[in-house]
Amino acid sequence: MPLFTKKAREELINAGKLIWREINPDIFGSMFQAIVTPGKRSDLGQHYTSVPNILKTIEPLFLNALKDELDESFDSVKKLETLLDRISAIKVFDPACGSGNFLIIAYKELRKLEHAILERLAELDDKHLVLFAESRINIENFFGIEIDDFAVEVAILSLWIAKHQMNTEFKEKFNVSIPLIPLKETGQIKQGNATRVDWNDVCSNDGGEIYLIGNPPYKGGKSQKAEMKADYPFVFGRRPYSKDLDYIALWFIKGADYIEGTRAELAFVSTNSVTQGEHVGLMFPMIFTKDIEIGYAYTSFNWENNAKRNAGVTVVVIGLRMASSEPKYIYSDGLQIEATNINGYLADASSVFVYRRTAALSPSLPRMALAPCQRTAAISSSNRGTATRFWISTLRRHATSSASQALRSSLTTSSATACGSQTTSWKRPRRSLRSRSAWKRCQNGGSRARQRRPWTTRSTRIGSSRTPTNRPSPSWSRVSRPHVGATSPWATSTPG
């Protein structure tokens, strides 16, 4: 235990002079944890979720619907009482709660809604002038799982601060004090690995109104540590899965298992890579086969918060629920767009998936090999034009069928970009001395490659009658088409 020195006493007195009721508890927990456990998480302060981003999660999930119901019930005492009973029974569960940011904002928003209902009830009916001595929104209805034991304690502390702040607001509105002490409620924050803990042991899904929210950790499949990979069997069991799944996919899959066949819904902030490319076909089919749909989604937006150094990531928000006839919405560039169906790419379209392939979809196209200029480590910008003309001229001599001509036409317009952007490092096949010389001229570029081709002779350059149609086939032609059979239109004769 550290000594209580004179300086420590002065710091404690100065801290007591601060206006603590104005502290924002949603960032307080993250700041506190970053100070007490430096290095345990990588610069934790820049990764906490800001209030606007948290609202993107909870507003479309349940808060907007509750506010709409308040507007519809504004003149009915009975409906307002029913709404008050409903919000008092709502459970909020964050299975990766950290310092409790999501739970704190959800608690405060429900308390604000409760205050609005009580204000209107007092206006409509005199019996409601005598207000409750306790809030109907109970901290015990807020659940969380966090792997860091100290963060668990910070989350509980942050919830107490949030409750004290809302009690102060309650007193200002209704002139009724709700005492915070003695502390009767401690919340339902549990320490553990959320991928290995049974979520029903933390927050029992009894068919009530439960909302899962949060910002689970994410890590690409190829950059995960061994302990992360060890969590996958606990989530998938005997179900097949890909090792390329992002780490956050474990929360989506486990969340889908949790809400399946119930009224529970979830919304997670996620890296946008889960909605792009191959990952969509790896994760979303397992979710959609449970008759679960995407109820709403925020397309990609930049991560922002009040920390000194923002996390440099682009994220999405994905909300899942059981399939229903309720409207679905896509939020993009500040617009709310109603959708018929939201697929894994967060587009209003049918749920189709693009999987990795090793062969072309069309059987009429020949198998392709990389152009010689694509096999180098890099081609400087000054040589791209030379390399492009070198490859296109080769295609023109050897492509005669209709399919090859169509392929040649497409490559004519795109090969400049392809030759300049591909950077690979594999070893080139062996070529004859003549082909290696031509290749070197193609790399070293410019004037020398244009002045002299491997198939030309001196008599051709000074005006010989020898025409291009009589040019011999270069010896490296067999290298540029290693997979083409004898019946291919490219299968011209090669030197023996």
Image: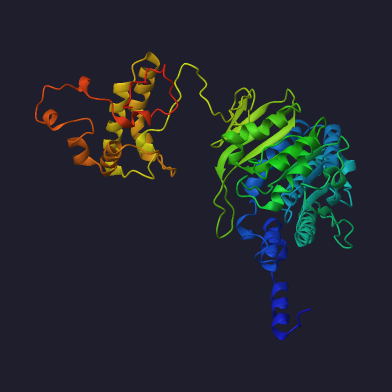
* Structure colour scheme: rainbow
467 vs 332: above or below: above
User: Which residue is nearer to you in this view: 441 or 4?
Assistant: 441
Which corner quadrant holds the N terminus? bottom right
Image x and y of residue 427, in percent: 42, 43
- Vertical placement of 452 versus 21: above or below? above
Count of picture labels: 0
As rendered, which of 199 and 431 lies closer to the eye? Answer: 431
Q: Is residue 437 left or right of residue 112?
A: left
Image position, residue 134 (x, y; %):
88, 51
Q: Up-down: is 147 above or below 195?
A: below
* Residue 350 figure quarter: top right
Q: Residue at x 88, y 37 (%)?
A: 206
Dividing the picture into quadrants, the one containing residue 403 is top left
Q: Judge from the rendering whether residue 251 lies leftward or rightward of residue 344; answer left or right.
A: right
Q: Residue 328: percent from the left, percent from the top?
A: 67, 28
> Which sits in the foreground, 147 or 89?
147
